[in-house]
Amino acid sequence: MGSLRQKHDALIFSCLRNLALGGILLFPLASLAEDATKDLPPKPSLIDLQRDYVSDKFLDLSRGIDSFFGTERNFQETDKSVLQLDAAQMMGRNGSPVIALTFKAKFDLPNAQKRFHLLLESNPDQTQNLPGATLAQQPLPLQQASLFKEASTPDSYGAALRFENSDNSHWHFSVDGGMKADGGVSLLDISIHPFARSSAIFITPLDWGQLKLTESLYSFNTTGPGENTLLELDHYYTDKILFRSTSSATFLYDKEYFDLHQDFSFFQTLDQQTSLLYQLSANGVSRPSAEVSEYVALMLYRRRVHQDWVFLELSPQLHYPKATNFLLDAQFIVRLEFMFAK
């Protein structure tokens, strides 16, 4: 009987000892867990979750529209590999039809974690390839093309290496440097010049849409150093209608005055294959006095005609330049675009 009691007491003592040792061992872990929870950010409230959902939805809608229209904004900001080939023809009363050929490509470099891209493009110093360009400014190479050429080839070609940092959804930074080859009749006439570009983009959601601010710096041998400030305000009426106000000011060091631009645009999605753009624009200068140099009203019909990489654009445009006392210059632009993205 005594031996049973001794075994019973020994068993109880062993259990108590194990519990005590377990408590001693687990106490530091519990303390560390408590300290770790103190460093964790507070859980977002329901209001914050709803706001983040709406913000992401606005951002996705905006990116979807820019991606469908193949805008310069999409090309500059996407982290995908993109190849765009354009064949555009402008018809107007001031000359015979002209076909302008342009291209630009952005290749994601392997093992670079989507931070480095190789850029290849035609006419990198012209308006449509500079940060802050809008659709109303894209016909510029057509207007500069020789009316005596059946097809207008690019005046220059550029190759650059770009570094991008877009880890934060509100900020997007990029800087690229490269070489530009100005075309000539023969290889001996070709000249090579360095160029550089950089941009900082800030995007923030608002109660009624989103705000985007872009600051860009660049330097080309043809334009010299330049700076562009771009402010965009997006407002969504429905999932298929987006209003965008675009205000930009470009300063070129050699010109010593600002080129000003204002767009009011409505993007309307008809279906998965077709979208429309309605746009009113004004171009101006800041010196010798602030004045409007041209008014533009345009409509752009864009349709995906083959799978997701062949697009057709039809764009009737009304231009009222000050150089002709704001007399109407009607234009009609047809563009066939091949856009590959991966």
Image: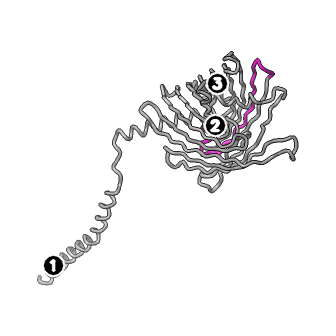
Q: Which residues are magenta?
A: 72-96
Q: Residue at x 71, y 35 (%)?
A: 338
Q: Residue at x 62, y 32 (%)?
A: 259
Q: Is residue 30 above or below residue 280?
A: below
Q: Is 232 placed left or right of 160 in the picture?
A: left
Question: Toward which corner of the image does residue 281 lie, by quadrant?
Answer: top right
Q: Secondary structure at mark 2?
A: loop
Identified by mark 1, the residue type is Asp
Question: Toward which corner of the image does residue 96 lie, by quadrant?
Answer: top right
Instruction: Tell me how far mark 1 sits from mark 3, CA to CA.
Output: 102 Å
The numbered mark at residue 9 is: 1
**Quadrant into which the C terminus falls:** top right
Residue 54 locus on image (x, y percent) = 44, 36
Q: Nearer the viewer, residue 265 or 190?
A: 190
Q: Is 9 placed left or right of 177 in the picture?
A: left
Q: Is residue 90 magenta?
A: yes
Crowding around mark 1 (Cα neighbors within 10 Å: few <14, some 14 to 19, many 20+) is: few
Residue 275 locus on image (x, y percent) = 60, 26
Q: Is 55 placed left or right of 313 in the picture?
A: left
**Quadrant into which the N terminus falls:** bottom left
Identified by mark 2, the residue type is Glu
The numbered mark at residue 293 is: 3
Instruction: Tell me how far mark 2 sits from mark 3, CA to CA.
Output: 17 Å
Q: Which residue is mark 2?
A: 256
